Structure formats: structure tokens, C-alpha cells
Amino acid sequence: MAIALGRNSKWTVRPEYRERMRKMLTEGLGLKYENPAPPIDQYSLGNGMLGVVFEDAALGEQDAHKGAWLELLVEDPAATTKRIEAAGFAQLEYQDKTHTYFQSPGGPVFRLAKM
């Protein structure tokens, strides 16, 4: 599966969201999990990495929802949506009905778009 976000990105999330974040990124988005050193998890994006730093001082889920929203480019948005939902994550309702939106556990909101 190919996903494009840039070569390297970092999300900061509270530690209590670690397991659900891992599930969304591995089962939902199909990313390869790597763990270089706590408190950082890394996930392969094909030509780059997504680092998730777990810190107590990170924004709460409601505040993260107010932050920057991201667009993830995927080969098949419909199939990716189904996989994320099968992993137990609901779509985020938004006025744009041409894309599906999700909020990562404790982290940023993202939409799926065709690569």
C-alpha cells in the first residue's frame, strides 16, 4: 500500500492513545510499525516515515481536532476507508462529502484522497 504525506512527519499524542493509534496506523492504514525507542513509534510510509511521539503534555483529542487537518494520499480511498472502519474506527462527519475523514486516536484529523 502506498501513502504519501511527505518524507518525514511527526504527530504528538498522549500515551493513553498508544494502542489505538497503533491499531489505526497498522490495521487501518496498513503501515509497517517500527519502534526505534520509547516514547517514539515509527511507521513506514514507503518513501518516508511517520513518527508518533507519546507525551503527557500533548493536546487532548478535542484540542487536536481543532488543529491542522491532513490529507493522506492513498491508492484506493474506498478500500482504505473500509479497512479503517473494519479496524473499529468511525468516519468523522464533515461538510465535504467527496472525501472520508477520520480522527486518529488522540491525534490529528485526516482525509483520504486518491494518489
Image (cartoon, rainbow, N blue to C red):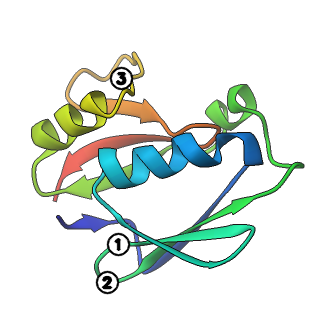
Taking the view exactly as shown, the residue that stands out farthest to the right is 57
Asked which secondary structure carries label 3, the reply is loop
Instruction: Determine whether, in the image, residue 10 is placed left or right of residue 47.
Output: right
| Residue position for label 3 | 91
| First of labels 1, 3 by sequence position | 1
Amino acid bearing label 2: Asn
Instruction: Determine whether, in the image, residue 16 is placed left or right of residue 95.
Output: right
Tell whether label 1 touches label 2 (CB within 8 Å). Answer: yes
Crowdedness of circle 1 by 10 Å Cα count: few (<14), some, many (20+)?
A: many
Residue 70, given in percent of the width and then of the height, sits at 46, 49
Asked which secondary structure carries label 2, the reply is loop
Residue 87, given in percent of the width and then of the height, sits at 32, 34
The answer to which quarter of the image holds residue 9 is: bottom right
Amino acid bearing label 1: Leu
**Relative to 17, is 94 above or below?**
above
Instruction: Determine whether, in the image, residue 50 is placed left or right of residue 64.
Output: left
Is residue 14 visible in the rendered structure shown here? no
